Image (spheres, coloured by chain):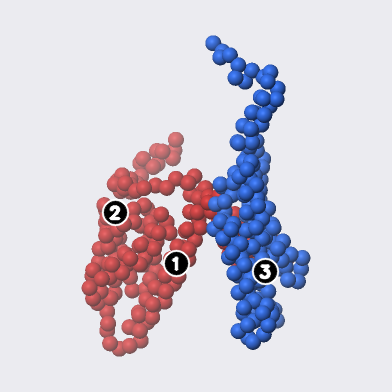
Amino acid sequence: MPGEDSSGAFDGFSRPQLILAFSAAPRRHWSRIKEGLVRPFLWNGVLAFVWALVIEDISLPSLALGFVLGYAILWMTRRVLETAEYCARVPRLIEFVAFFVWELVWANLRVAYDVITPKHHMRPAIIALTLDAQTDLEITLLANLISLTPGTLSLDVSPDRKALYIHHMYVRNPDVEKQRIKNGFERRLLKVLR
Amino acid sequence: MRSLILNTATRYLLPLILLFSVFLLLYGHHEPGGGFIGGLVVSAAVALCALGFGVSTAQRILPIPPPQLIGTGLLIAASSGAWALFRGKPFLTAVWGQIPGRGNDQFHIGTPLLFDLGVYVVVVGVVLLIVFTLAEAVDLTGAQAGSTERAISGTEEGIEPAAGPPQP
């Protein structure tokens, strides 16, 4: 097969394969995700649409109201229809998004304040964050969330995937900043993903 | 007589029926519907679940047992009447408020909705208390009913070698 030949000949693949061999990451099976999360979510969408049909107003507010009511109904019947996992995860997702927006605004204001005032408040440093995130997706999402926040930039993951190197603009105490990111972004992200 | 068709249909119909009951409750003031009918629809949905999956499964839909639902519903309905007392009006006088919507739309919300909600909960409690009490006498899924049926037919006919000589 030409595909196998080219992948075997291409030298760049050898290093990622080595890293993958290191990861003893717990993998979630797609069938479980489908049963526990995707199907209830589709159900919630169907209920929102049925609600919009019943009140004869297919618009965004009525669809949103239908989604909320549908979620409430799936929560009521969670022990019969087995939608408990989905119902538990939606509030966590909302909490995560709210926290991320809050962090984004706050970090923006801090950097903007530093830019428009003459005095220099920065104390840049590179910190190594010990990771609880294990799978490729978890680490990638966490790194990108940190990069999206102004003032912090994720540089690289250590070869053994135990640490994430972050360039941070305001480091008074490295341990405090590490705990802030660990209890903020990482804990909430893992609560949504796991 | 646990039926595949009934079970599958119940699984898909239950959320839809519950959604429809919420529609009946909220739109019942100006259109056909209201707390009583909405409560009956919920009871029908739970009874359907009891027919398909058994009473113990159906009971898990309810957050609290039916007798406590009756008390909760009565409390909600009574509190809707007490609202008017704080305004210096007779008990159960309707107090209306308005929620501004888009454009000229305004949502009217008031104590009659709260009263309807109380009725809704009471109806669910009463009907399901009756349904569950009756269902406990005869298991609706047929596990117990089947065994009694077999016992009756066995004594009536007396010919069927149900407990006949053991086969070699």
Chain letter for mark 2:
A
Residue A71 visible? The answer is no
Q: Where is residue A179 in the image (x, y as percent from the top left)?
A: 28, 67
Residue at 55% across, 52% down: B60
Looking at the image, can residue A190 be seen?
Answer: yes
Chain coloured red here: A
Say which amino acid is labelled 2. Answer: Arg
- Are discs 2 and 1 located on one and the same chain? yes
Residue bearing mark 3: B116
Chain of the residue displaying label 3: B
Nearer the N terminus, badge 2 or badge 1? 1
Q: In the structure shown, which secondary structural element does the residue marked by tag 2 occupy?
A: loop
Front-lying residue, A129 or A40: A40
Picture disc at residue A161: 2
Q: How crowded is mark 3: few (under 14 residues within 10 Å), some or many (20 or more)?
A: many
Q: Which of marks 3 and 1 is in front?
A: 3
Residue closer to the observer: B72 or A119? B72
From the top left corner, tell me how far across and down residue B131 is, in percent.
65, 50
- Distance from the alpha carbon under mark 3 to that under mark 2: 58 Å
Amino acid, disc 3:
Asp
Q: How many marks?
A: 3
- Residue furthest top in the image: B168
Measuring from the top left, give residue A72's x and y in whole percent: 57, 61
